Image (spheres, rainbow, N blue to C red):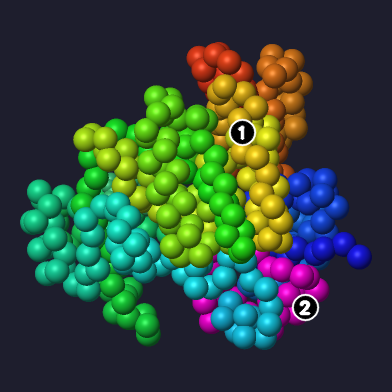
Amino acid sequence: MSTTVGVIGGGQLARMLIPAAVNLGIDLRVLAEADGMSAGLAASMVGDYRDFDTVLAFAETVDVITFDHEHVPQSVLRELVARGVTVRPGPEALVFAQDKIEMRRRLGELGLPVPDWAAVENPTELAAFIAEHGGRAVVKTPRGGYDGKGVRVVTHKHEVDDWFTALAEDANGGALLVEEHVPYTRELAQLVARRPSGQVAVWPVVETVQRDGVCAEVIAPAPLSSGRLAAVAADIATRVAEGIGVCGVMAVELFQTTDERLLINELAMRPHNSGHWSIEGSTTSQFEQHLRAVLDLPLGATTPRDEWSVMVNILGGPAEGTLFDRYPAAFAAHPSAKVHNYGKDPRIGRKVGHVTVGGADLDDVAYEARATAAIFQD
Ligand code: ADP
């Protein structure tokens, strides 16, 4: 009998786990939110991940539960664990990817570098923070944000009144996270994997380029990161993974500041867009590594296969027709590009696929990857 891994969520991350599972003879099953999802080809159940009975019924068919996203409620996860289900990463780690205030608090306790922050419950407290930080701050909803939704740069205490009102109506109450507006020169991401018995593996730190709050491009390794910067980023991610007991792959999103510090922005406790390059670009991809880690198997080497890898997201997709219609043009012009199609309907801003190119010359690699992705979006 083969080992069975259950993934909650049917998005593209679950989809990209499928080939890694097939190669290792692992039986991968997916609890998808709806029919026709990106990971539909492995969907063994369709149902609501917020409903305990649905999730338990799914969990009973697998050896270990893991995730495509971080939205499964803590109450559901804790009850699963209480019933003896193996959940990786576990709820006590996952909470730090679900709640940005909890994350800031815990990282502070661990002595890790984060922006100045506070939890604010009303406009008066927000005004005080803005005044102490040069008249500008970044406010975030602690839960449920993604791709820049739930993040606002503010200069005035009343710019997030709608969020304060929503909090007041929420039975759980709570606060908003406010942070200094970090003077950063670029954004980096450090991917790390940790298995329950303790082994940790890191990939090289990468540069992520965001447009309109969405990751547009990733350069691996981050240019100008061959020395100490890479070691500091790897050390930070290792300390986070060990400090909060992560099982599986985690991405630590970092700001590199104008005075050359690295500050932690966010944690994602699953394979991450910043690691898609590793499918072709690393000896062990983030998807294979995630499976190894959640099954507590020895981790694979993370050595890059190429000097440079550039990954460009296909955002939105073609105005007419499908990605498939553009294959002849893209494949003819760019035979070295690796195209990934998530099987999703094109929609403005939506991540519908990505392109990775690897090679020895960064300019050529970036050109090939960008030019290929451009063929799929207009
Ligand atoms: P999400 O959960 O939506 O991905 P993030 O916390 O990663 O939200 O923020 C989205 C983007 O907003 C970041 O990629 C960065 O460009 C910008 N941002 C977030 N926090 C700060 C900050 N403290 N200072 C400056 N820019 C920020």
Q: What is the distance, in whole Å, between disc 2 and disc 1 at their CAs?
A: 36 Å
Quadrant of image for the C terminus: top right
Quadrant of image for the N terminus: bottom right
- Left/right placement of residue 260 relative to residue 210 reads left
Q: Nearer the viewer, residue 130 or 315?
A: 130
Give the residue drawn at x 46%, y 69%.
95
| Contact (Cβ within 8 Å) of mark 2 with mark 1 | no
Give the residue drawn at x 55%, y 40%.
203
Please give the range of residues in magenta: 50-76
222 up-or-down from 330: above or below: below
Please tell me which of labels 2 and 1 falls first in the chain: 2
Q: Secondary structure at mark 1?
A: loop
Q: Position of residue 239 (x, y in %)?
A: 42, 55
Q: Position of residue 255 (x, y in %)?
A: 33, 42
Label 1 neighbour load within 10 Å: few <14, some 14-19, many 20+: some
Q: Can residue 247 be seen in this snapshot?
A: yes
Q: Position of residue 185 (x, y in %)?
A: 29, 33
Q: Nearer the viewer, residue 98 or 320?
A: 98
Q: Secondary structure at mark 2?
A: loop
Q: Can residue 37 be seen in this snapshot?
A: no
Label 2 or label 1, whichever lies nearer to me, is: 1
Q: What's the amino acid at mark 1? A: Thr
Q: What's the amino acid at mark 2? A: Glu
Q: Nearer the viewer, residue 35 or 65?
A: 65
- Left/right placement of residue 252 relative to residue 2 reads left
Q: Nearer the viewer, residue 182 or 153?
A: 182
**Tag of residue 259:** none
**Tag of residue 303:** 1
Give the residue drawn at x 61%, y 59%.
195
Residue that mark 2 sits on: 60
